[in-house]
Image (cartoon, rainbow, N blue to C red):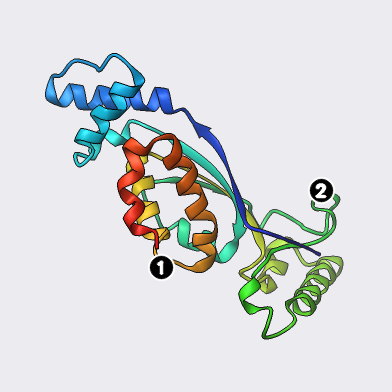
Amino acid sequence: MKIIKQSYKITRFNPEMDVYDICDGYCTCYHSKMPPTFEAQCEFIRKHREHESPLEHSRLSVKFFINRGISHELVRHRLASFSQESTRWCNYSKDRFGNELTFTDDETIKEFFSTNDLLETIEQKYIDMLAAGFKAEQARAILPNNLKTTLLVTANFREWRHIFAERCTKRAHYQMREVMIPLFREVNSVLPCVFDDLEEYIA
């Protein structure tokens, strides 16, 4: 059994190309000239970003290493593309998975009971079911929400603005905020002209 901290990795982010394409959208709408530099294009976006449709001429891809409970919330964002590790086809008793289950850490519940004992029991029962001839798609029925999953998310900046606004607030699940706030900080540090007005949603 392995327990990991949740994390993410940005796999596609091309600020210069995306800023140019977003500005091209605004210039098309307003019949304006393209600002000559990246910095000028960023200021042009900041000036007009309340008009959100040109922000769709962009793409950000992020691979999340999170628990399945959090993944179930993320895939509810309709205007995005998702590819997720499948518990139906992934047999975690195989060598490529280290013959073990991987779970995400949850510090908030450790004071109440020993999660390790419970997770070790689940892991053993899962492996026993596979050894007894059950398929992975059957054995997955006993797997908990804090099983680690890998989820690749691709969306345009307009949709990422919506995701950040929903998933960084105090109302969001604490494990969602654990990955989403650092992601917002990283993306916003590169393109504040697109994202910095969302700071108000982070408490």
Residue nearer the viewer, 91 or 176: 176
Residue 189: image location, x then y, percent: 44, 39
The residue tagged 1 is: 170
Residue nearer the viewer, 54 or 135: 54
Q: Disc 2 residue type?
A: Arg
Which residue corresponds to the image point at 13% horizontal and 24% vertical from the top-left?
Answer: 30
Question: Where does the C terminus fall, quadrant-wise?
Answer: bottom left
SS state under label 1? loop
Residue 161: image location, x then y, percent: 35, 47
Residue 65 shown left or right of residue 15 in the figure: right
Residue 179 shown left or right of residue 137 in the figure: left
Q: Of circles 1 and 2, which is in front?
A: 1
Q: Residue furthest left?
A: 30
Which residue corresponds to the image point at 18% horizontal and 22% vertical from the top-left?
Answer: 28
SS state under label 2? helix
Which residue corresponds to the image point at 28% horizontal and 22% vertical from the top-left?
Answer: 40
Residue 19 shown left or right of residue 34 in the figure: right
Q: Quadrant of residue 43?
A: top left
The residue tagged 2 is: 96
Q: Disc 1 residue type?
A: Lys
Residue nearer the viewer, 160 or 86: 160
